[in-house]
Image (cartoon, grey):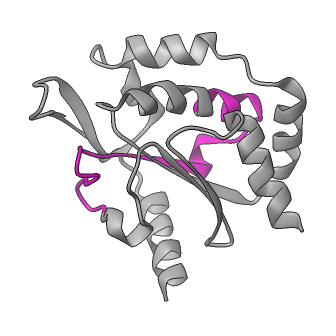
Amino acid sequence: MKTMFLFLLFISISVSGQNKCELTVDAKTGKPMLLGLTKTVDFQDSNFYQWFNSEYTKYKPDSATVEFLRDNLKGKNILIIMGTWCSDSRREVPRFVKILDAAGFPETEYKIITVDRKKKAPGFDPDSLNIELVPTFIVYENGKEIGRIIETPIETLEIDLKNILVKKEK
């Protein structure tokens, strides 16, 4: 039942043609934050582009691992849960997006949901996915979760992602 719910959630997010994120204010800091289904282009807003572009540009993914990902991410979907207020999210999400871009993984195959400090966003229930820390990167195949990276990688993002895919093959 939970797997079917997750699959339906991902499909409903996928078929939504418009961007659903909203710009709001973090009550704790008074700074702008995004909430909801977000596209990478939304990080080019003047409130976010500096940290996003800086991390994206300076990160150098391991090319051999990226080649593995290029061949093995086919048929997968990825859900990224992050907070624009969170330093781990501001560091890891641009790096993860760069890895996906380098591997030729299309943005149509991954979704980014930006959440508030309670891990909530319009139309998103963090409890349904057991989200406690952000960022959380969840990899799906055929609507079923095959692995996740939570908050910070064990090795590097690309190696942790590779390990999820290798573990699935066993």
- Image position of 73 with respect to 26: above or below: below
Q: Is residue 24 magenta?
A: no
The residue lying toward the viewer, choosing from 53 and 87, is 87
Residue 67 appears anywhere in the view:
yes
Number of callouts in the render? 0
Could you tell whether 144 is left or right of 66 in the image? left
Q: Please give the range of residues in magenta.
A: 97-124
Farthest bottom residue?
Answer: 1
Q: Give the quarter of the image for residue 148.
A: bottom right
Q: Is residue 112 magenta?
A: yes
Q: Give the quarter of the image for residue 51.
A: top left
Query: Which residue is located at x 65 percent, y 16 percent?
Result: 59
Measured as percent of width and height from the top left, residue 119 is found at: 29, 52
Residue 73 appears anywhere in the view:
no
Query: Which residue is located at x 23 percent, y 51 percent?
Result: 118
Measured as percent of width and height from the top left, residue 52 is found at: 45, 19
Could you tell whether 23 is left or right of 152 in the image? left
Could you tell whether 164 is left or right of 2 in the image? right
Q: Quadrant of the C terminus?
A: bottom right
The residue lying toward the viewer, choosing from 61 and 111, is 61
Could you tell whether 77 is left or right of 29 in the image? right
Measured as percent of width and height from the top left, residue 65 is found at: 85, 34
- Image position of 160 with respect to 4: above or below: above
Measured as percent of width and height from the top left, residue 126 is found at: 34, 62
Query: Which residue is located at x 59 percent, y 26 percent?
Result: 95
The residue lying toward the viewer, choosing from 50 and 75, is 50
